[in-house]
Image (cartoon, grey):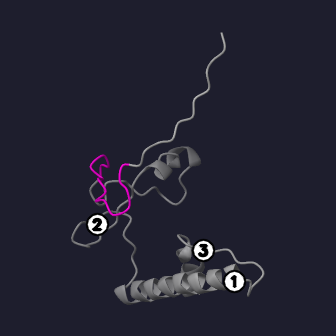
Amino acid sequence: MEKKLRFYVPEPKARPGDVPDFSQITIPRAGNVERPPIDASTETLRHLPFELIRTLNSDGIPKGEWQPDIPASVLKKIYKYMCLTRIFDDRMFRAQRQGKTSFFLKSRGEEALGVVPSIAL
């Protein structure tokens, strides 16, 4: 007997303009996930990609072992440059879509990878 093929299109939980429902998401307390030591083995780190690591509580106050030991002025400087990176990315991406540049990859979501090492220098 041949199995009949079926085509399934999932329905989104919310449509544009609707209020989304995030009640199925459990948000842990800030500082709930322990920070591993820098020399931890890879076997002990396997759970981290599947965890939500919160460093700020609901009031915006850093909690737990993950909070950086960096002055607020440096954190604000890092945030400023991350925002500028996103603005630059959007501008360059529009130019690439218009054919004004040949090739461009956005760094959206990875802004810290370019900013933080340069601040550390």
* Viewer-side residue, 58 vs 21: 21
User: Does residue 2 lie above or below 105 as drawn?
Assistant: above
Q: Report, in whole angstroms, how far the alpha carbon at label 3 lies from the one at label 1.
A: 19 Å
- Quadrant assignment for the N terminus: top right
Residue bounds of the magenta highlight: 13-27
Residue type, mark 2 in image: Lys
The residue that label 3 is drawn on is: 107
Circle on res. 63:
2
**Residue identifier under label 1:** 98
Is label 3 or label 2 in front?
3
Asked if residue 43 lies in the magenta stretch, the reply is: no
Q: Residue at x 37, y 56 (%)?
A: 15
Q: Earlier in the sequence, mark 3 or mark 2?
A: 2
Q: Position of residue 66 (x, y in %)?
A: 39, 65
Give percent across and percent down for residue 45.
51, 49
- Residue 120, image quadrant: bottom right
**For the C terminus, which image quadrant?**
bottom right
- Give the quarter of the image for residue 69: bottom left
